[in-house]
Image (cartoon, rainbow, N blue to C red):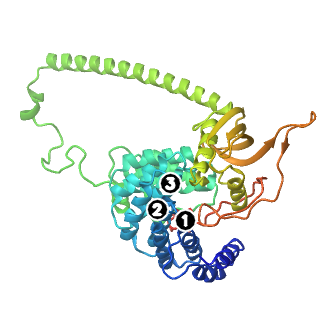
Amino acid sequence: MNQQAFEAGRDAYRQGDLTSAVRWLEQAKQPGEVSGRIDHLLGNCLMKLGNYDQAAIAYSDALGDSSYGHSGALAANRGRALLAAGKPQEAVASLVMATKDSDYSTPYKAYVALGNAYSQIGDYREAGVAYRNAAIDESNPDPSGALRSLGGCFMKMGRAVDAVEAYRTALDFSTPLESQNAIYEDLGMAYAATQRWSEAVDSFGHATANGNHKLSNESEAALEAAKAALAAPTGSSSSTDAFLIAAGYGSGADPLDPLGKSGEFIPSPEDTGFFDLSEQEMVQLDASSRKVKRKHRHSGLRSFLLFLLFVMLLAGAAAAAYYNGYGWPLQENVVEDLFTTNAEGGDISGLLSSSISQEAAQAIDAVLPDGATGVTVEGVDRSMNESSALVTATLSAGGEQSYRVTMVREGIGWKVDSVSVEYPALDGEEPALSTGEPAADLDSTAADATTTDTVSTDEAGESTEAEGEDGTSTTSGQL
């Protein structure tokens, strides 16, 4: 390796001079040399420059260096590059490879891209499976996007009832109003497809309530069809049927004979014996029928009330735990995973808060001890949105060192916001925290960073995302 050229390329990458970074990194490898460290960083540069075909080649070269590791991140990046280059079929194989790497800490990124790839080739069933896996991945800080995409797959497969549930769950996991508008529009379409007209009108109303979202032409037609269906008298066939058919809802078939085979509007006496019954028998049959219906109604109501009570108790317990600082995974689990993953040389980015900067993430990586042989959580200070833990790590060279790990709430779980070294108190003074300048950014890619111990928080994540037309990330990477 030409160390001087590599360092020049790394510095240019940190400064945002991607063109110079590419030029230096291409000079850093000797002829025939294999270096995952160089090619990973080169792929990142090319990806950000929009040169997706060359980026995919660079990531492939990096995967050829078995000693480098990070195969999950590299395969995911390669898959996203191929997807952005318009090669979804090739992207599928690479993204599936990424999901098989048990050391890859953020598999939801690969699953989302895999869902996009399957959608582009028209395999909505496999796309739905991928989006579902992305949504249930504990490392996913925002599962609502994957759930919305899952709902879209259900709609493509003609499973509108399942789409309704997917969209409603997506709303449960989304908080900003701007992101909910589009989900409400999708939910309105799903309700309309199931002819639940009142819910459809209500959902479309939520989508446009703040005036920041405009419905598509298809959604406008569905809304008008739903309004017409609600306004029409029961059994009328005025202009409503034509409106529904024009919007794609309702077949115009007789509800008593949806297949149009018999042409009859009342039960056939040959089939039911209805017209052979005496008046007394008809009265007895009606009384028996009503008794059975009342029994079923009461039984169903009791079951529903018991279920509702259980849900209320469960919701109350969950709310109390959330308020008192509990979540899943627990703070102790996050801290242990952080030190263990770092000690094993893995990628810790999935454990870090999405709000911290690349510089802060790099500084955290620098503060954590390499090759720690053990970690003990001495105590956790919990609150609803912020927590901190005092940790003792057994160092590889012997001895122990204390650390303070602060965490912030993301979803129902916790993510690391900062890590600092704590030194023992001297002469009755308070324990001292280490100080120093934070390291420059380089995520779990190629460059070794030398930093001091202080970890600061800032405002941006460390990977770039190229958004597709559907609002989901298609070229984002753990770069």
Picture layout, residue 94 above or below residue 436: below
The residue lying toward the viewer, choosing from 174 and 306, is 174
Q: Position of residue 446 (x, y in %)?
A: 60, 66
Q: Is residue 118 left or right of residue 49?
A: left
The residue lying toward the viewer, choosing from 392 and 241, is 392
Q: Is residue 318 visible?
A: yes
Label disc, if present, on residue 104 of the rendered structure:
3
Residue at 66% across, 82% down = 20
CB under 8 Å between discs 1 and 2: yes
Q: For the residue marked with disc 1, what is the amino acid?
A: Ser
Q: Residues within 10 Å of mark 1 (few under 14, many from 20)?
A: many
Q: Earlier in the sequence, mark 1 or mark 2?
A: 2
**Residue ID for mark 2:** 113
**Separation (CA) of disc 2 from disc 3:** 15 Å
Q: Is residue 421 left or right of residue 194?
A: right
Residue at 19% across, 16% down = 284
Numbered disc in front, either 2 or 3:
3
Give the structural element (helix, strand or loop) at label 1.
loop
Residue at 50% across, 73% down = 34
Q: Residues within 10 Å of mark 2 (few under 14, many from 20)?
A: many
Q: Position of residue 170 (x, y in %)?
A: 51, 48
Identify the image quadrant of residue 306. Answer: top left
Label disc, if present, on residue 126 of the rendered structure:
none
Q: Quadrant of the N terminus?
A: bottom right
Give the structural element (helix, strand or loop) at label 2.
helix
**Residue ID for mark 1:** 476
